[in-house]
Amino acid sequence: MKTSSGLLRAFMESTRDLLPIVIVVAFFQIAVLRQPFPELLDLLTGLFLVILGLTLFVQGLEMGLFPIGESMAYAFARKGSVSWLLAFAFLLGFGTTVAEPALIAVTKKAAQVAAEGGFIHHGEVAREGYADGLRYTVAFSVGLAIVIGVLRILRGWPLHYLIIGGYCGVVIMTLFAPPEIVGIAYDSGGVTTSTITVPLVTALGVGLASSIKGRNPMVDGFGLIAFASLMPMIFVMIYGAII
Amino acid sequence: MHELGRYLLDSFLGTLTDVLPIVLVILCFQLLVIRRRIPNLRRTVLGFVYVIIGLSLFLVGLEEALFPLGEAMAKQLTDPAFIYAGIEAIGGAVRWQDYYWIYLFAAAIGFATTVAEPSLIAVAIKANEVSGGVIRPWGLRTAVALGVAFGIALGTYRIVTGTPLQYYIIAGYVLVLVQTIFAPRMIIALAYDSGGVTTSTVTVPLVTALGLGLASTIPGRSVLVDGFGLIAFASLFPMITVMGYAQLSEWQARRGHKSENP
């Protein structure tokens, strides 16, 4: 257990992390836009909550998310069952993405674009169907991405060949996808990786790489997130090109 | 204050539904496949509780304080009245240089929000642990934040000039590929990962507001087509700066080594 001085230090660190935002916002508000701060008290309360929240999150990260990710990686490695591990990897990617609020927002915007571009009918039902289809496509692609990433760690495939292959996929799909969807497709890579998924998936990768002989956790352990942000781009463009 | 309480509850429930699928997947596999007690069960559960409460507070604070202000700022800075105020006096046409405050704001807000991004903090902690302290958390985060700052500034320039997004992204990919050949092998996976983690809770809403505001202000830009793409810039450039940072420190180490043994 951390002592109170440890907590205080963590709190100070979070304050330092938030400081740049405060400086930037204050500078632009005062020096460039030349306006007073609206509702200063609310602002300070909000800032305090952000700092407190970040402190708790980082504590919980080291107590809960990292250990569970690693212990599961070790358990799977000891069990030696590749198919269960891959099933877990897929569900972790799919399950954490399908309900992601940022993704839901993006798919709604995409349906709007598609309706305006005339790919689907204007209308609530058509738009919702399009948005849901897109959401499941992205969630599936993230699940698949984690599966491929885990397989790479198990087999020791070099990461850069896979990533370069993925980029070629993105470039090729860019040529075929309707131009209206390209911006959203590129953005969808960034929004899929949520704050809770990232630590878990990172711990899983590092745990796997350190429990398998001949793998270096630094070289092989990272890279899962990279797949999870690459795959959705390709799949969203495929989805846009087909429908 | 009453409203704050409702916000807190909403955010707490939202985070809970976010975490629930993950907890279910973990529990299922732990009970049915691994069939072993979770080590330090109480500590782990407490950690999850901390994560959920911490994230809810974090989001409420952002929505209470920073997002409204940041979004209002993005709107004001992209307001024609603000941009064209100085130009009409001279009587010239608007050039891309006239948007300098926007580029500066884009870079500054990109840097600042990335430094505060919780998932980047998580990856930085892990990288420091795995590398045995060689990769300093603060150094990695600064490198990533610089990449995001440059990426978003360039992204706003693209919206202003209206050049196609694909050219920038493909050119960025080519640079990443070239760097992959020359960068130290140790950093490559981490650099690729840092592209994906930069854009989550803090960065996305503010950057999206900036992109949409800018695209709706500039004549001839479509909000839906040109407003997107900033996130893509924000996930591409950190890869370049993180590999660049590693190349630079390797080069410095080599040079220092040479001067020691002439």
Image (cartoon, helix red, strand yellow):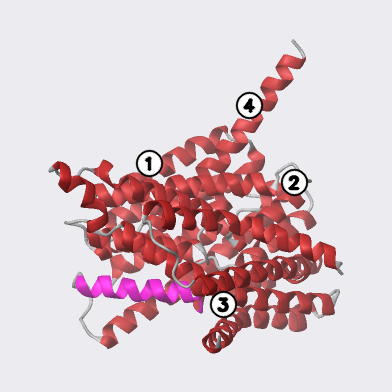
Going by the numbered disc 2, the residue's amino acid type is Ser
Local secondary structure at mark 1: helix
Mark 3 vs mark 1, CA separation in Å: 34 Å
Front: mark 2 or 3: 2
Which residue shows up at 47% across the image and 48% down it? B149
Question: Would residue A185 be found to the left or right of residue B131 on screen?
Answer: left
Mark 1 vs mark 2, CA separation in Å: 31 Å
- Subunit bearing disc 1: B
* Residue A241 falls inside the magenta stretch: no
Residue carrying label 2: B131
Q: Are marks 4 and 2 in contact (CB under 8 Å)?
A: no
Mark 1 vs mark 4, CA separation in Å: 25 Å
Going by the numbered disc 4, the residue's amino acid type is Trp
Q: Nearer the viewer, residue A41 or B65?
A: A41
Mark 4 vs mark 3, CA separation in Å: 43 Å
First in residue order: circle 1 vs circle 4 = 1
